[in-house]
Amino acid sequence: MDFELKTLTLAGAAAEKCDALIVLVTESFKAASDPLSALVAGALKAGDLETKPGKLLHGYRSAGLAATRVILAGAGDGSARRIQSAVQTAVSGFRNTAIKRIAICLPHDAGAGAVRAAVAATAETSYAYVATKSKPEGRALVRVTLVVADAARFSAELATARGVAEGIELARELANLPPNLATPTRLGQEAKRLAKAPGFKCEVMGPKEVAKIGMGSFMAVAQGSHEPLRFIVLRYNGTAVGDAPVVLVGKGITFDSGGISLKPGPEMDEMKFDMGGAASVLGVFRALVDLRPAVNVVGLIPSCENMPDGRAYKPGDILTSLSGQTIEVLNTDAEGRLILCDALTYAERFKPRAVVDIATLTGACVIALGGVRSGMFASDDDLAHALHKAGETAFDPCWRMPLDEEYAEGLKSNFADVANIAGRAGGAITAAKFLQRFAGKFPWAHLDVAGTAWKSGAAKGSTGRPVGLLVEYLLGLQTKPQARAKGTARRAA
Ligand code: BES
Ligand code: MN
Ligand code: ZN
């Protein structure tokens, strides 16, 4: 799917040949004398069109219009948020149709964020999973023209929006794949493929290398499965090699059965999405391939299955993590923190400016925040503020949660330095407190995306979150002095 910008008035848009022309109509709509304006003004006057987002009025082969269909769509106050929901509503009507080319007329006074909102909504709504269907009916849309008053003003915004959309789409596609295809090995191959772009590097380690490093906690989770584990290290250099990188750590459990502490049957299929954190890291790197911001980024993905087996780890086992801390396993279903803790310790070697882990970590976070906001925990206020702000801008919001020391009380163990679970109360927070023990040497944040990485029910599928938040955060680092302290030179492509 290709996006392009065009400078046109509504009079010009009337001559735009396409399968469907979407006209966003805001509260401040002012009619000119062209046919399209007259159509909108007439519909508003007659009360057949409302400017509330979600309201649509359809026309077919209307006089004076080159487009086959015209869709007038209420866009409220014209804010990016309203544009996003208006485009979502309009484009969702194109599912299972042959509509290939569309044009979207943004409000003539559209401000920053409008193009981004329209691109994100179009990409999101027109995505179709086909990878494992025998009769694939994919996305029909091939060209989307964004009609604006001044295309030059939006060209940088369009480039960002495209890059982010590509990243989100890769994350969705990988997370939607079934667990027999999206194995740790496959994730390693996807990482290698991404790293073919200039400025990128990738190393994929297997069981032998991980044992040699001493990731005893990660290895224990993997040992119940026949699928070999992978530890993926992705690197992107967008600025001087010596500049401290941001490290992203993604939970890559490609199937979480719970292990010996087996999960109940209903909805267990959804535990294929337990690699959503890993998929989001790969999605961010996909966006970096296109956007090439002046920042260094490392992606770390510990990936394995969590399965019950004669060789599986079990409650009571004591593991020795890479950090040297010993861990008593009280529940094999609290496996995410056990693979992440070793990756967090590994992150120390990059002397990072910040480490952000992304994980579908706890059912408790779904109870706390539902599917609207991801849970965000941070040891550093600046990092917390930057992530929060990025989430708001990217329409991929998060909410900061507490890390008081008292929450760590329940993790005490009689037989090891720490236990892998505490009681039921505050489960998302106690999980974060566990991780924090391994993140003492750098500014650290943890995004619990258990509620936001995928949707259940009829709309079951990956959302690609929090790729939008993370890319926005990384782009924001470019202008900060720290990123430029040691030189602004970009590495040659
Ligand atoms: N992957 C799950 C978390 C999860 C559960 C995400 C349901 C989305 C929906 C994680 O590995 C897990 O099983 N967590 C346990 C922790 C518990 C044993 C302390 C949970 O949340 O029940
Ligand atoms: Mn689990
Ligand atoms: Zn899990």
Image: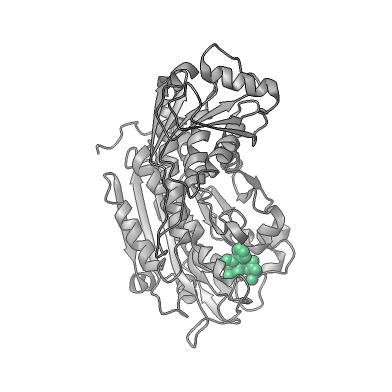
Q: Residue at x 64, y 76 (%)?
A: 264
Looking at this view, is 214 or 315 the one in front?
315
Looking at this view, is 457 or 10 the one in front?
10
Where is residue 347 drawn, in percent x and y? 44, 56
Where is residue 334 drawn, in percent x and y? 59, 70
Res 429 visible = no
Q: Residue at x 62, y 56 (%)?
A: 451
Res 362 visible = yes
Quarter location, residue 486: top left
Where is residue 38 drawn, in percent x and y? 57, 17
Drawn side of residue 98 relative to residue 337, left or right:
left
Farthest left residue? 492
Quarter location, residue 31: top right
* Quadrant occupied by the C terminus: top left
454, above or below 253, in the image = above
Looking at this view, is 223 or 279 the one in front?
279
159, above or below 284, in the image = above
- Look at the image and name its color scheme: one colour
Where is residue 106 drawn, in percent x and y? 52, 26
Looking at this view, is 457 or 393 the one in front?
457
